[in-house]
Image (cartoon, rainbow, N blue to C red):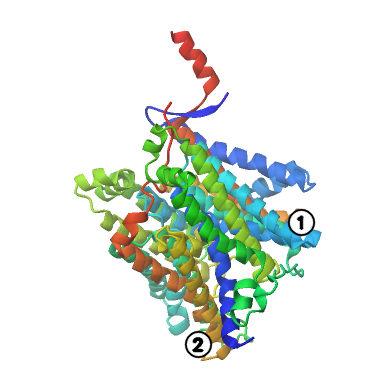
């Protein structure tokens, strides 16, 4: 394995959690809901995934538990914002605070324990192709899932009736309601899809990225995922490009640190956050790019009149 | 039978006051269940958590030490949220305020006069305000979402602090511990009496008084309310949303900065890699529990400070995890938001309304 290949493999590892969480949030936001609780759902996915995998010894049960953890938190968010019509920004913040606290409590007895690592699923023959084989066909199931999700969401959102309904609910909930669509039900489903993806992303962190439980191990990745959705202008394919770019930045810091140019490690560690801000500024400043695809009803509360 | 929301003709004053109390009651109830599940006597645990901190002089002092930064930050945030400006990076502004304010004791160690303390607090406020100015500028100039930028800047500030205390400002006689020199004399906040309560709590009360007047008696306060509730109406009135964004972020950032320098010049007495147990985030809960009203924030700050102290006490007395306090705080915010629905809406059962309409016919 040469150096380039190793770098590409680590970039994929760093990008996958961002991609998984962001694709879920993209669907949620397309339905007109802004869920700022990604970080909280992700960290719950990480702790539930680790705990279940450690207890059973099976990483796949861990993945399932991670998904359930994310979905459970997103369900609370859905009850509050959809049924009780609360402010989405505040509720999302509450979800993050709750997720960080709850995961710390659940994970307390798992700190420092050796985790169960999710194994690679090498596809026979294909993974032996020189250079691109291990990159494309020697990954674990969550990397494949993340790539399938990009194509899956693109197809569903833009080529199917379900996608049309989701986008209409996100762009004009009053019209969608008048046409007879159940706005609240669509949003419930999209919120919980987002929760499932965030849970997957967290499980990836605690089962594949660093197979152990560390408190607050998401380290702001949930927030970066939220920024990525803005960066992608709500298009799954641009989201994938963005996620891999961000993953590269995340890894670059580590490599530069290893080479040791005498730059303090803290400055390199803050690089992904600085880059996130810069990316947000560039995209948000471009009005044509953002206005075309921004779901028009994002963040607005909808209470059906009877 | 189905529960539905029915909009009230006007928002309920009664529920505005009742909702936080209801939320606290529900949180306590949930807490009792959590304790019971852990095999503890829920009554004893709740006593340790919420009542015991108020029974001894020592813990009462600690409540005020912790309430001071929560009230300072929460008051600023409540003005922000009133205007629909979502500054959630107070933790970062607190950190920057602490670093900039610490220039005085670390660089000008020999300057011992009350003026040195004034300079520290001023620099702290300046540091926090300037740090909050960045998301304000990015919001106004590039329309960049202030929620994401201000939050990203928390991580940057914390890493910067980590570098400062391990690098340039490390105490040369500190046995290589990551901390600055210990502040002395007039470079520490004076305490009230012999205890640990410092003048931070007085500053917090003064700030609450000023903000109360600002929000209820001045044009600026009215502007903030109008822009927050209806930006369109604000534009017709000639109010500038951009100016309100600047004002709110600078104000809340400055107050967070004061809280930050208050922490290092108060309880800790030096810069350390971690200077706050998440005050900047807990203050978000304080702002909401306090009805986004400065006076409400005063009570909410004390309430949340009690959960910090109660959490420590429960850890020692009952062996409960110190994470429980954070869970309580999260649940509390959830319940407040849920109960606030009752201010604007009535919850009705669909079954019973049908009967009413039948009766009306």
A208 or B95: nearer the viewer: A208
Asked if the residues shown at circle 2 and circle 1 are in contact, with their CB atoms under 8 angstroms apart, the answer is: no
The residue under the point 46% across, 63% down is A237
For label 2, the SS is loop
B181 or A7: nearer the viewer: A7
| Image quadrant assignment for residue A283 | bottom left
The residue under the point 50% across, 62% down is A225
Query: Can you give x and y, in whole percent of width and height, for residue B306 in the image?
Result: 60, 51
For label 1, the SS is loop
Mark 2 crowdedness (10 Å alpha carbons): few <14, some 14-19, many ≥20: few
Q: Chain of mark 1?
A: B
The residue under the point 48% across, 56% down is A154
Q: Which residue is mark 2?
A: A263
Q: Residue furthest front?
A: A125
Q: Which residue is mark 1?
A: B319
Q: CA distance from mark 2 to mark 1?
A: 43 Å
Mark 1 crowdedness (10 Å alpha carbons): few <14, some 14-19, many ≥20: few
B87 or A234: nearer the viewer: A234
């Amino acid at each position: 394995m040469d150096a380039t290949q190793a770098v590409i493999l680590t970039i994929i590892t760093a990008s996958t959690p961002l991609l998984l969480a962001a694709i879920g949030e993209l669907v949620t936001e397309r339905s007109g809901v802004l869920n700022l609780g990604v970080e909280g759902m992700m960290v719950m996915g990480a702790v539930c995934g680790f705990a279940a995998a450690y207890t059973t010894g099976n990483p796949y049960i861990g993945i399932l538990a991670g998904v359930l953890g994310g979905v459970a938190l997103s369900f609370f968010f859905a009850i509050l914002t959809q049924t009780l019509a609360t402010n989405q920004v505040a509720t999302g913040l509450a979800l993050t605070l709750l997720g960080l606290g709850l995961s710390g409590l659940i994970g307390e007895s798992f700190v420092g324990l050796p985790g169960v690592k999710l194994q690679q699923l090498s596809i026979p023959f294909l993974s032996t192709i020189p250079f691109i084989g291990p990159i494309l066909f020697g990954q674990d199931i969550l990397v494949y899932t993340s790539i399938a999700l990009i194509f899956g969401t693109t197809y569903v959102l833009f080529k199917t009736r379900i996608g049309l309904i989701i986008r209409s609910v996100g762009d004009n909930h009053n019209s969608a309601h008048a046409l007879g669509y159940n706005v609240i039900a669509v949003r419930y489903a999209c919120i919980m899809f987002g929760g499932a993806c965030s849970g997957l992303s967290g499980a990836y962190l605690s089962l594949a990225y660093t197979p152990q439980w560390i408190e607050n191990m998401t380290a702001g990745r949930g927030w970066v995922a939220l920024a990525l959705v803005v960066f992608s202008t709500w298009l799954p394919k641009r989201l994938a490009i963005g996620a891999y770019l961000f993953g590269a930045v995340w890894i670059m810091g580590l490599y530069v640190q290893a080479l040791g140019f005498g730059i303090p490690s803290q400055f390199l560690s803050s690089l992904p956050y600085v880059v996130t801000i810069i990316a947000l500024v560039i995209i948000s400043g471009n009005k044509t790019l953002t206005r075309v695809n921004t779901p028009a009803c994002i963040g607005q509360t909808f209470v059906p009149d009877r | 039978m189905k529960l539905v929301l029915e909009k009230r003709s006007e928002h309920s004053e009664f529920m505005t006051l009742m909702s936080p109390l209801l939320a606290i009651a529900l949180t306590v109830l949930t807490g009792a269940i959590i304790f019971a599940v852990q095999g503890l006597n829920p009554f004893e645990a709740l006593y340790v958590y919420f009542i015991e901190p108020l029974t001894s002089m020592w813990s009462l002092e600690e409540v005020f030490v912790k309430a001071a930064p929560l009230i300072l930050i929460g008051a600023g945030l409540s003005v922000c949220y009133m205007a629909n400006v979502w500054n959630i990076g107070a933790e970062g502004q607190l950190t920057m305020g602490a670093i900039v304010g610490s220039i005085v004791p670390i660089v000008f160690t020999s300057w011992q006069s009350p003026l040195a303390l004034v300079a520290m607090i001023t620099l702290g406020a300046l540091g926090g305000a300037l740090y909050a100015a960045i998301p304000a500028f990015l919001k106004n100039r590039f329309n960049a979402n202030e929620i994401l930028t201000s939050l990203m800047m928390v991580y940057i500030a914390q890493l910067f602090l980590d570098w400062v205390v391990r690098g340039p400002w490390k105490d040369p006689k500190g046995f290589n511990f990551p901390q600055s020199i210990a502040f002395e004399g007039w470079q520490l906040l004076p305490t009230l009496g012999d205890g640990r309560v410092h003048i931070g709590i007085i500053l917090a009360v003064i700030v609450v008084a000023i903000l109360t007047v600002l929000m209820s008696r001045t044009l600026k306060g009215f502007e903030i309310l109008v822009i927050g509730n209806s930006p369109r109406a604000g534009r017709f009135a000639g109010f500038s949303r951009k100016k309100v964004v600047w004002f709110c972020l600078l104000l809340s950032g400055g107050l967070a900065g004061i809280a930050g320098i208050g922490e290092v010049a108060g309880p800790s007495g030096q810069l350390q890699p971690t200077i706050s147990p998440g005050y900047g985030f807990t203050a978000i809960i304080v702002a909401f529990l306090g009805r986004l009203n400065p006076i409400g924030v005063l009570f909410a700050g004390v309430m949340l400070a009690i959960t910090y102290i109660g959490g420590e006490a429960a850890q020692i007395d009952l062996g409960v995890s110190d994470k429980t306090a954070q869970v309580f705080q999260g649940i509390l915010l959830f319940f407040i938001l849920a109960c606030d629905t009752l201010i604007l809406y009535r919850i009705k059962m669909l079954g019973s309304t049908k009967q009413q309409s039948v009766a009306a016919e």
